[in-house]
Amino acid sequence: MDQRDATQIAMQAAGVAKKGLMLKVGVIAGVLFLIGLLLLGGLSPLPSAQAFSCEDTGPGTGVSAPDAGTSPPAAGSVRTQQLANARTIDKVAQKLGLPGKATLIALMTAMQESTLQNLNYGHADSIGLFQQRPSMNWGTKEQIMQPEFAATSFFTGRGGNKGLVDIPNWQTRPPGDVAQAVQRSAHPDLYAGHESAMRALAREAGIDLGRQGTSADNSPGTDEDAASGEIPSVCEDTGSPASGKGGTFTDGKATWKLTNPRSVEEAIAWARAHAGPNSTGGWYRLCLAFVAQVYGWNVSGVYYAIDHYKVVPADMRHDGDRHPPPGALMYWDTGRRAGHIAVYLGNGLVASNDIERKGHIDIVKADAFETKWRAKYVGWTPPYFPKAS
């Protein structure tokens, strides 16, 4: 909006207020104040970080987000800066012999902390890509403002602060959990929300997130809290599918051939083995990721649970039907963008995250989402994942 447009708006607004001198004066003063803000840039949008994820985790709002009006020192557009910084982070990871997953975790962290820009300001004395603090022994201000130095510190630690390689079993833990273990943020759930966006940015930057590492830190670890050892990333690019064949699935009228890595019987057994006391954490708002892994997929290929119901062919959808066969996928409208999805185990029970314990998998009655969350039941489909990989 230029000054001429703002003036016209002011004249029109002033013309509306014809009753009472005080009202007119107040309107004119208010409009003039608005014009001043526009001309001075007072209404310019503040920096923000947008996050996309496998579930409805919302936009990132990190505590280390910029809180000053200073411009970042880097030149070029924001996207140009992000791509350059991403490549620098990956270069450091490769130099240290770390795999692509280490790069992914670092990118997710930097996007949350600084929108992947080398900021010379932040909360308290936080600065740089990872908003590291000189007062917390991450280095001097001059050192932290060097992207390679900051990335090396994130990966290996510095000044008594743990780095990524110091986190037990970091190779097999969810990326967001590892990021939090290094950063120790007051908002631990926000890192995971950047995974999908950072995978897209990495592809744009020519970064291979499936790259294997060459150092000892890339050796497989064992998570004592995990029932089956490895906990894959919720949006993993690579990985070995589970054994078994998809088989067929029927509703008594129609029969469909499945291509899932696990059969229905194997999937139900896997879900039961990973629920209750055997459940690992890290499943908060990741219902679609969970059901995909139940059937052996590394990624569902769809962002939101309720959207998965729509990508399944119409002849597979059973709107409102409450008699699904064991192994079916059940859906609920929660009143939020993502909705909810769970795996039906038979006998009125489903395996689901968050319903009993946030971030964990439990076996509950299928109507628990309606009684506890007041969700609206949508229907069920066969365990069909047309966009999975």
Image (spheres, helix red, strand yellow):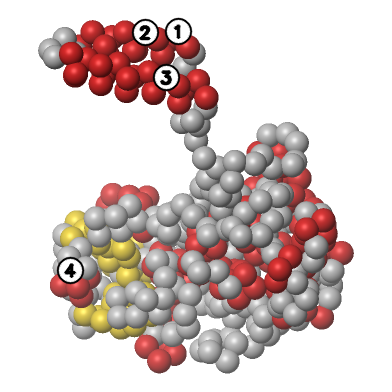
Q: Quadrant of residue 253?
A: bottom left
* Callout 4–callout 2 Cβ contact below 8 Å: no
Please give the residue where the numbered disc 4 appears in the rendered image.
Answer: 370
At label 1, the amino acid type is Arg
Q: Label 1 neighbourhood size at 10 Å, few (<14), some (14-19), many (20+)?
A: few
* Front one among 231 and 124: 124
Q: Nearer the viewer, mark 4 or mark 1?
A: 1
At label 2, the amino acid type is Gln
* Number of the label disc, if any, that sits on residue 4: 1
At label 3, the amino acid type is Ile
Q: In terms of sequence position, does the residue under pointer 4 or pointer 2 come before the other?
A: 2
* Callout 1–callout 2 Cβ contact below 8 Å: yes
Q: Is residue 231 visible?
A: yes
Q: Quadrant of residue 274?
A: bottom left
* Callout 2–callout 3 Cβ contact below 8 Å: no
Q: Quadrant of residue 180?
A: bottom right
CA separation in Å, label 4 and label 3 = 50 Å
- Tell me what residue is drawn at x 64 percent, y 88 percent: 222
Q: In terms of sequence position, does the residue under pointer 4 or pointer 1 come before the other?
A: 1
At label 4, the amino acid type is Glu
Q: Is residue 323 visible?
A: no
CA separation in Å, label 3 and label 1 = 10 Å
Left or right: 368 as drawn, with respect to 292: left
Please give the residue where the numbered disc 3 appears in the rendered image.
Answer: 35
Percent of width and height locating residue 322: 16, 68
- Secondary structure state at the residue bearing disc 4: helix
Outermost residue toward the front in this view: 22
- Secondary structure state at the residue bearing disc 3: helix
- Tell me what residue is drawn at x 80 percent, y 63 percent: 140
- Secondary structure state at the residue bearing disc 1: helix
